[in-house]
Amino acid sequence: MSNRLINILVPAVSVVLGLLVGALIMLFTGYDPIEGYAALWNGIFGDIYAIGETIRQITPYILAGLAVAFAFRTGLFNIGVEGQLIVGWFAAAWVGVAFTDLPAFIHLPLAVLAAAVAGAFWGFIPGLLKAKLKVHEVIVTIMMNYIALFVTNALIRYVSDGGDNTGRIAESASLGSPFLQGLTDFSRLHYGILIALAMVFVMWFILEKTKTGFELKAVGFNQNASEYAGMNVSRNIILSMVIAGAFAGLAGAMEALGTFQYANVKGGFTGIGFDGIAVALLGANTPLGVVFGATLFGALQYGSLNMPNEAGVPVEIVSIVIAIIIFFVASGYVLRLFLEKISSKKEAK
Amino acid sequence: MEYVIEMLNIRKEFGNFVANDNITLQLKKGEIHALLGENGAGKSTLMNVLFGLYQPEAGEIRVKGQKVDIANPNIANDLGIGMVHQHFMLVENFTVTENIILGNELTKGGVIDKKVAAKKITELSEMYGLDVDPTAKIEDISVGMQQRVEILKTLYRGAEILIFDEPTASLTPQEIEDLIGIMKRLIAEGKSIILITHKLKEIMEVSDRVTVIRKGQGIGTVTTAETNPNELASLMVGRQVEFKTVKKDATPGEDALVIKDLVVQDYRGIDKVKNLSLTVRKGEILGLAGIDGNGQSELIEAITGLRKTKSGTVFINGNEITNLKPRKVTESGIGHIPEDRHKHGLVLDFPIGHNIALQTYYKEPIAKNGIMNYSKVSELAKKIIADYDVRTTGEDALARSLSGGNQQKAIIGREVYRDPDLLIAALPTRGLDVGAIEFIHQRLIEQRDNGKAVLLLSYELDEVMNVSDRIAVMYDGYIIDTLDPKKTTEQELGLLMAGQAKQRRSKQGETAHVE
Amino acid sequence: MSKRKYGLGLSVMLAAGTLLAACGSDEETQETNGNSGEGSEPTEETADFSVAMVTDVGGVDDKSFNQSAWEGIQKFGEDNGLAQGDGGYDYLQSASDADYVTNLNNLVRRDFDVVFGIGFLMEAAVNDIAQQQPDAQLAIIDAVVDQPNVASVLFKEQEGAFLAGVAAALMSESKQIGFVGGMEIPVIERFEVGFLAGVEAVDPSIEVDVQYTGAFDKAELGKTTANRMYSEGVDIIFHAAGGTGNGVFAEAKERKTKDPDANVWVIGVDSDQYEEGAVGDTNVTLTSMLKRVDEAVYRISEAAMNGEFPGGQSTVYGLAEEGVGLADSRGAIPDDIMAQIEEFKQQIVDGEITVPETRE
């Protein structure tokens, strides 16, 4: 069995296995798996509206996944995507609301940039603490999430005079597109997907084509050898967190300028940042893998909304089924091992 | 003749790779039987078969004439086979007793009875002259002592046959002496020993017979008394091997590296290098001899910029490099083969090609305006892989997948290719087999012959004596003497290294007089 | 060898899974078909009207206003002989803020006559859908959406909270009262302001400890906050904190279990939370401030069914409209005090007292 075949077969078989176990669970809880999966399918691909919404859902997942994967490739565990996303969300929304008479070609890039800078700053702090004081980034980033949540809540209240919402961003800062909405029957599909895909390319380019990427990866694998080879380990750790934070901040911009068009006071985390960890791991921390992971995650998350709607499967069961599918895909490496054993045995004979 | 262990025509495959092919090893009662082979020849595989970790595809194992099926290590233990692993399997913060009884606890009503165990351990320790304190914690005792704990562990479980896997790899010369004594004592008490090694000197010194394997093939068994190191080496490598490194006399030129009054501390703030002054000239190899832990590592880290100095100066070609960043040091003309190739020398999860470019990746032609040109990386890698005989499936293979010798060749290629004025080689042959050692020594001498300076740090007396043009002996942070290897003996050197003869030799004296 | 066994096991499992799924699904399909057949069969009293709602992230069993709204819809459905599902009544839950638009859209597409968005969080989503689907009839609770096809429902929480404040001030022995809020947003501030005004109207010397936990779903935060308040001598806590408030109940019940004579009380919110406060034979629930989302939902559905959908209007439910009020205290509040509360109520209804809406 060729490697290429295994590479295709593993995710495919994993998904099928996940679907089968998910079906068993629906069966045992008294729901019709075929109807359930039909609803899932329709929720994802059913019509042009669903497809538009699915892509919209995938967009922030791609960026959140990149934010985790990029840091991971340089040996850092960025649990702070959630916080970086929230500050990016606020920054973009604020720029979108505060300036009202800028032309779109300045306003929109400015708002997007504000999100990236805010996220980058939120990544810079744990990066600095890690590089200079050896404080573990997991602890710092987790705490930064809470700081982000409550600081942005306070800021939103401040800018809205005690309200719970920044109000709608100016049209000139919106990623929304009447063209895409018209194309997809009023879905909330927006131009953010283009930014997300561009960032996939950016991550690939930085890691695979630049000197900086070479250093970042080297530092990620072995700090001692990197120092021996004359690299500035601290600088690379900080840089890695800054770039990862910028990706996460952009994920926030997707929400602020695309999906919601405002920022509101939040009672808890969005969950996108944490799902980003799973997305990155599903995608083996490679840029293209993240697109795959985000697509799977986003499509299942979005499509699953249709399961209670069309098939009457309760949300709780839906959550279990979705979790199981993702679990099977994630544990695909077990399957890979198994397939490789088979193929090596055959070759031996 | 009674054999306690017979491994007959053993074959072990991993997929389509044959690790052991038709190997026969017969161990007599009461003998030390050496198992000799290069790294990767299949020694460990064979022993793992005996220890029940692997099942052979063909061949049979007999214990005291009875055919046995060793399905797992517990069966091996029951048959009286014990293994002293190269990498000790001890729990750092447990005591000696706790480690020994681990997995084999004597209990009294569910409570571990440590007293009884400790008593038995003390008895065993005395019987074999091991001198182990059962209440000491592993983290507090020396490596040599830890190895004795491993030996005790097998004895405690009633081992009759002991397998030693590369037992001298991490020991000091004195500890090696002691170990040899212990092995002889074990034999005297009726045990039998299989000694896995690639060090010919040890084999000649302690073993009764030698079984040689090469590339998975059993080459044969010879009686130690009837052979010599040259013959064993040729059997092992498959060709004639030069032991005495052939080299011309050195023609030292100007000073390359000049160190003055250097003080370096370790991470705890304790002085490890104390007012050290040292000069290495162009066209010579200066051997830095000494027992591990006398400040050699700190000295080299300080020279190469990996560790800050406390005081003193370091010059290369007349330019001061004290406390410069590693890259500045590298660019000032220093090549560094680091003592721990996995920690400092290589990014193991990078392809070997990337590793070969690790010191030059940031410069043209590889990087231009911040963009990498990976085809230039491959070009460089291919050249070094070919020139330095690095055995790998290609420059894209992960560094991790190469054997230690080939990893080291790649590092040496990387450092020597830049043609540095000073090459620092720290333990360049650690853990390598004779073939690779020979190759590396030749490269160092070549470098010297091209008029470059070489600083060689080694814990091996042979290596220091053979390769160096001058020997500086380091003890407790000082250079206590500088010797001419042609005019000294291993005994003198050994004593200096142990810090026991800190007196000047008479200038004309050809041999040292040790009091 | 063992690997082979593992492989075999895996394939057996796989095969079995396929078989089971195949058999099972057939039966299930039939059953479901049967069900839906029954459901769609029109019975005599069935009205030709359907209604549905989307919950916010609190979910349908939040023991608070989502649940209350759903109860209103269920009651409306039963009263009019509707069945749950298409053409009758239904709900969808939202797992995140991003789901509101999708869920609202799904329900509109399923041709429900009125679709409710429950909670101010859905303001923007309802606004968007209303524009995209001008033929749909939408309603929103706790926010105003200025679209001709949206009915907005607001509550004068401050009036209900005022009565809760009166009750607390009259009942407190320690003269120390607590308020636990969820997030510091305008809706919850109305609870706070009304409550403080009610306390002050009875006894200006009583101090009220006002705390916001910053979340509606953190029972543990509610519990620690309540623990601190009770320890400092507070004897009555009014919570307006959704799920976080369950922690307040938990703390009060814990104290009551340890010491049956402990003087700790909770005033519930939104729906009658009497059940929540039961400790054996006693109960820590003093009363609950009702916010009759169920009533509002019911009335709007009824109006729409009669062709009088209040699109483009906002309806405000206060004490006068019986949209807010206090729940039955089941004897926890003695009659004489009940009478005083009733007096205040009447004064508000008559406009003699105007309860403030925002902090000064």
Image: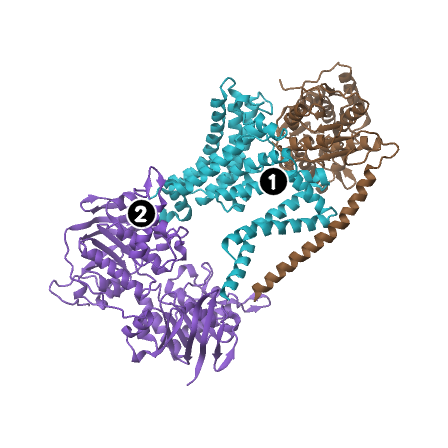
Chain colours: A cyan, B purple, C brown
The C terminus of chain B sits in image quarter: bottom left
The residue that disc 2 covers is: B359
Question: Where residue C86 appears, x then y in whole percent?
Answer: 77, 35
Element type at mark 2? loop
Kindly identify which chain the residue marked by label 1 belongs to: A
Element type at mark 1? helix
Residue at 40% x, 66% y: name it: B147
How many numbered marks does the figure carry?
A: 2
Question: B452 or B96, which lies in front?
Answer: B452
- Name the quadrant containing residue B365: top left
Above or below for A257 versus A301: above
Residue at 13% x, 63% y: name it: B506
Residue pushed farthest right?
A: C44
Amino acid type at image mark 1 = Ala
Q: Is residue B129 visible in the rendered structure shown here?
A: yes
Residue pushed farthest left?
A: B508
Above or below for B310 versus B140: above
CA separation in Å, label 1 and label 2: 45 Å
Question: C264 or A340, which lies in front?
Answer: A340
Mark seen at residue A299: 1
Question: Where residue C359 appears, x then y in whole percent?
Answer: 63, 19
Kindly identify which chain the residue marked by label 2 belongs to: B
